[in-house]
Image (cartoon, grey):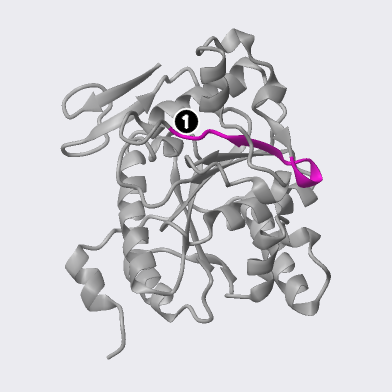
């Protein structure tokens, strides 16, 4: 069951909070859970999918959950646009007992299991409900019991409790950003959302993934100011663009020195995250502070 928590009732998530809370009995246990956030279009799905493969190459059993109505988080893993959890639930009039695992879970490249949660029709519902139903289904079908790593790939910036819902399951939240003002502005909002959830849940900041950026000077400046760390840096390379067009992960592309360096960076990131990272305590900035901090003198 999903319900709304308001200030002064239940376990609020901050001053004036109106947040979606999931049934506390629907928890992911026994797996390392990561939630990947960042500005829309920043490359979260590319990052999530290649990180999933890197974990699988470490011998881990991986489940990736896409949390976007576009349901395109996992298409480089499965080579198709999968039906969403909401799609299959509507098909059986929300009688979950009529569903089989193969109705909503597909095996992708190198054994990565893939689920697309989808989302409610525009303007009609909350993404938190969708996340809750997805995890509930996975538990009912015992699909989480043998899983080592769960990666939530979450829609865009965090602006509501619904799309902050994966933070209630995650152990670490990772933020994908480019070396520009808009991406870092979005990252600051995500830091604030994670800080709010950390009051009542186990989630903590795991670090920053710099993406589509030659340099990281602006990211470094922001990290130093708020208390973040960059865990990986993926440059704006054509091989990454081509991998999406070929509906392939980077681990399936034709070998080259450039590609080998990117693959090695993903493997190093997976190894670091699996070994465990110390939680980062970051202090988000006011909008004006970011405006004054970034840019060239």
Tell me if mark 1 has few (under 14), some (14-19) or many (20+) residues whose alpha carbon lies within 10 angstroms of its own: many
Q: Which residues are magenta?
A: 108-119
Q: How many marks?
A: 1
Is residue 157 placed above or below 268 in the rendered structure? above
In magenta segment, residue 276: no
In the picture, measured across the screen, residue 193 lies left or right of residue 81, that is left
Q: Position of residue 256 (x, y in %)?
A: 81, 76
Residue bearing mark 1: 131
Is residue 89 placed above or below 76 in the rendered structure? above
Residue at 48 percent of width and 58 percent of height: 207
Residue at 63 percent of width and 45 percent of height: 74
In the picture, measured across the screen, residue 5 lies left or right of residue 152, that is left
Q: Position of residue 200 (x, y in %)?
A: 34, 33
Residue 27 in sight here? no
Residue 60 in sight here? yes
Which corner quadrant holds the N terminus? top left
Residue 218's quadrant in the figure?
A: bottom left
Which corner quadrant holds the C terminus? bottom left
In the picture, measured across the screen, residue 99 lies left or right of residue 25, that is right
Seen as rendered, the residue at the extreme right is 255
Residue at 28 percent of width and 59 percent of height: 284
- Asked whether 170 or 89 is in front, the reply is 89
In the picture, measured across the screen, residue 168 lies left or right of residue 209, that is left
């Amino acid at each position: 069951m999903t319900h709304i928590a308001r200030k002064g009732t239940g376990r609020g998530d901050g001053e004036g909070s109106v947040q979606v809370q999931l049934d506390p009995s629907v928890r992911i246990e026994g797996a390392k859970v990561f939630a990947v956030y960042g500005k829309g279009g920043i490359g979260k799905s590319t990052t999530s999918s290649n990180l999933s493969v890197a974990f699988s190459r470490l011998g881990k059993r991986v489940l990736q959950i896409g949390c976007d109505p576009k349901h395109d988080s996992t298409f480089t893993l499965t080579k198709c646009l999968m039906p969403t959890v909401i799609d299959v639930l509507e098909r059986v009039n929300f009688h979950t007992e009529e569903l089989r695992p193969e109705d909503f879970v597909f095996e992708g490249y190198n054994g990565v299991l893939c689920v697309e949660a989808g989302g409610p029709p525009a303007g009609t519902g909350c993404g938190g409900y969708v996340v809750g139903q997805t995890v509930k289904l996975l538990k009912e079908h015992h699909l989480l019991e043998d899983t080592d790593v769960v990666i939530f790939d979450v829609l865009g910036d965090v602006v509501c409790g619904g799309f902050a819902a994966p933070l209630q399951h995650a152990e670490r939240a990772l933020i994908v950003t480019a070396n520009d003002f808009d991406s870092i502005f979005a990252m600051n909002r995500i830091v604030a959302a994670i800080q709010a959830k950390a009051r009542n849940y186990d989630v903590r900041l795991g670090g920053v993934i710099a993406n589509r950026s030659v340099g990281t000077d602006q990211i470094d400046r922001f990290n130093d100011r708020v208390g973040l760390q960059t865990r990986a840096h993926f440059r704006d390379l054509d091989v990454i663009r081509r991998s999406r067009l070929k509906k392939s992960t980077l681990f399936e592309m034709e070998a080259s020195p450039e590609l080998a360096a990117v693959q090695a960076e993903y493997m190093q990131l997976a190894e670091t995250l699996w070994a465990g990272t110390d939680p980062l305590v970051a202090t988000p900035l006011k909008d004006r502070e970011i405006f004054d901090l970034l840019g060239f003198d």
